[in-house]
Amino acid sequence: MWKSKKITFAVFIAFTMAASAFANGGIRWYWNATGTPPAEITLKNDADISLKKENLTLRFVDDSVIVDCDYILFNKSGSDKQIEFAFNITDAYNDSLIYYSIFLNGEKIPSDFHKETSWDEIESVYKFWELSKLTLASKKESKVSVTYRVQTSNDGMHYANKFNDNSFIYNLYPALSFGNGIIEDFNITVDITDILSWGGKLKKIEGIDLSFNNSDRILSRHYSNFDLNKHRQLKITYNIKNWYFRSLYEQYAKYPVINADSELTEGKTIYAAANMSDHNCDTAWVEGKSDFGKGQKIKINIKGWITQVLLVNGFRKTEKTFYENNRIKRIALYVDGVRLGEMEFPDRKYCRVDMTNILDEGELLNLGDFFGENNLSKVLQSGRGFISDSNIEIEILDVYRGTKYNDTCVSDIYVIAAQIPIP
C-alpha cells in the first residue's frame, strides 16, 4: 500500500521590533493521519497593523490549486515597520509547492529559502520556509500579494475500486493576530471550471458559508467584518477521478492482444474481440453463442504485471444498441488459469464514454479484492498490482437482458501498468 504525503503550509508574519502577527493562508493535509506542526516561530499580536481587506482566489486545476491572495494592511503607527513574511512549508520532500511569489504594492519581493531539521511522531524531517522582508509605510495602506501553486492530496491506490477524493485545506486563523481578528472586507472566489471540464465534482465546502450547485463553475462571496474567531479553516473536497485515470493511461497504458472464445458474424460484419482494444464506442465485441454467452471468456494476453483493468460494458454506439443488447452483469476473473473470484457490475444507464467520464461509466476491476491467501504469490508486495505470466481471463456468468437481442456486448477494455502511486 502506498502512503499519501503529509504537507503543511502556513503563512506567518514576524515583526523585527519584538512584535509579530499572522497573515492569512496555508494548506494542510496529513501523513498517517497525524499531521506535522509548522516550524517554530514565536508570534505576537501587533495592534498597530490591521487587515482592512482580503481578496482570496482559489483556482482548482487538476490535482493542484492555484492560490492568489491580496492583503490590504494598514499601519496606524507613527513610523514605518519592517516585517519578515515567512511562508512556511512542512514537507519531507519539498516537492508539492510548484511555485511561490510575494509582492509588495505590485513589486516582486525576493525571498530566501530556509530549512531546519525537526522530529515528528513518524520520522526526522526538514521544515522549510521562504522568508521575505517587507516595509509597511506609516499611516498608509500597503498591499501584500501572495501567489503559489500546490498539489492536493489523494489517497487512491493503483487497484482501488474507486479513486478517492482530493482535499484542500486553507487556514484562515493566522490573521487573528492582526488587530482584533476581524477582516473588514473579505472576498473569496473559488474557480472549479477545470474540475468540471473533466467530469469532476465539487463534493463539500466546510468552515465557511459558501453554497454551490453542481453546475456552478465560479463561486464568489463578499463578507463584511468577517470574524476569524468563528471561521478558522476552509476545507474544500472534490473528485477528479477521470482526470487521474486519463493521466495514468497516457503514461502507463499496456496494449495486449485481446481474444475471446467466440465472435458474432452478421453478413460481412464481424463483431471481433479486437474491437475491445480500439477505444471506440462505435464498435464492440459480441459473443457468438446461441444463448447469452454464459461461460464465454475474454482473454487478455499480456506478459508482466498489471495494476488496472477497466471494462466499458455494453454496445455504446447508440442508446438503441445499448439497450437492445445484453450487458454483462457478473464475471469470474482468472489469472494464468487460476480462478481468483467473482465480481458484479451495476446496471448502468446509457451514456457515451470518453476520458471525461471513463471511471463514472467503466467497470474498474478491483484486482486487490480477488486475491485470497492461496494467491498471494501473484501479488507484488510493493503495491504494483499482480503478475501475469500468460493471460487474464474474464468469464461471463450472468447478464442484464437486452430488449431485443440475446447477444452480450463489450465496447472497450483498458489495461494499465502504472509505476507510481496516484498522487
Image (tube, helix red, strand yellow):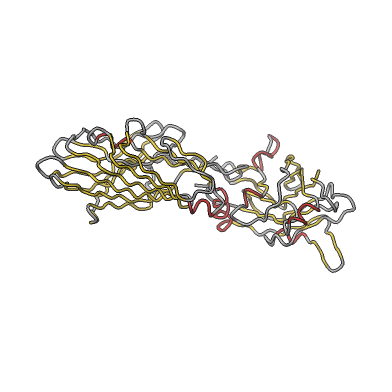
Residue 324 position within the rendered picture, expressed as x and y whole percent measured from the top left: 81, 53
Of 325 and 365, nearer the camera is 325
- Residue at the far left: name it: 78
159 left or right of 293 in image: left
243 w.r.t. 368: above or below? below
Q: Which residue does the image show at 31% across and 43% down from the upper left?
A: 128
**Which quarter of the rendered picture does the N terminus lie within?**
top right
321 left or right of 218 in image: right
Of 129 and 168, nearer the camera is 168
- Residue at the far right: name it: 290
Residue 178 position within the rendered picture, expressed as x and y whole percent measured from the top left: 24, 36
Q: Which residue does the image show at 22% across and 53% down from the upper left?
A: 105
- Residue at the far bottom: name it: 268
Residue 231 position within the rendered picture, expressed as x and y whole percent measured from the top left: 36, 33
338 left or right of 291 in image: left
161 w.r.t. 108: above or below? above
Residue 362 position within the rendered picture, expressed as x and y whole percent measured from the top left: 66, 50
174 left or right of 199 in image: left
Q: Which residue does the image show at 68% across and 53% down from the upper left?
A: 351
How many marks the image carries: the answer is 0
